[in-house]
């Protein structure tokens, strides 16, 4: 009986910890030291500049890994967005040629 109660307690603690991590914005699917998934970067790019994605590349620039995203908005304007590959922070937003 004590093992059952102890097992329940450990399960409860694990569920509570996972719930807190999720509520604080931690992504449980990501492993430390890995770039964000392409789908996440595509969603971020569309949130900043809604439009059609043309190209997404993972590059190494200035000592850091970044995603370079090219897209066209509804008015036909081309945009180039650069995101930090690990945090998703928008680093550069430039109107294309």
Image (cartoon, rainbow, N blue to C red):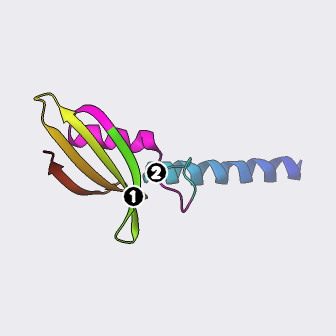
Tell whether label 2 touches label 1 (CB within 8 Å). Answer: yes
Q: Is residue 29 above or below residue 52?
A: below
The circle drawn on residue 22 is none
Q: Quadrant of residue 87?
A: bottom left
Mark 2 or mark 1, which is nearer the start of the sequence?
A: 2
The verdict on residue 34 being magenta is yes
Which label was assigned to residue 36?
2
Residue 78 to residue 94: above or below = above
Mark 1: few, some, or many residues within 10 Å (few <14, many ≥20)? few
Q: Left or right? Give the position of 1 relative to 36.
A: right
Q: How far apart are the alpha carbons under marks 1 and 2?
A: 7 Å
Residue found farthest to the bottom: 63
- Quadrant containing the C terminus is top left
* Residue 43 as seen in the image, left or right of residue 71: right
Which residue appears at 16% of the width and 51% of the height?
94
Residue 3 within the segment the image draws in magenta: no
Give the percent coordinates (x, y) of residue 33: 54, 62
Residue bearing the label numbered 1: 87
- Mark 2: secondary structure: loop
The residue stretch that appears in magenta: 32-54
Q: Residue at x 67, y 49 (%)?
A: 12
Expressed as whole percent of the image width and height from the top left, the position of residue 43 reads 34, 38
In the rendering, at what x and y percent does residue 86 appear?
43, 58
């Amino acid at each position: 009986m004590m093992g059952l109660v102890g097992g329940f307690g450990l399960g409860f603690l694990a569920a509570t910890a996972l719930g807190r991590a999720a509520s604080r914005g931690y992504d449980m699917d990501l492993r430390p030291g890995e770039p964000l998934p392409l789908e996440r970067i595509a969603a971020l790019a569309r949130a900043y500049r809604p439009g059609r994605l043309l190209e997404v590349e993972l590059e190494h620039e200035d000592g850091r890994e970044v995603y370079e995203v090219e897209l066209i908005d509804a008015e036909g304007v081309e945009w180039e967005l650069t995101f930090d590959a690990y945090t998703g922070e928008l680093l550069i937003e430039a109107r294309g040629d």
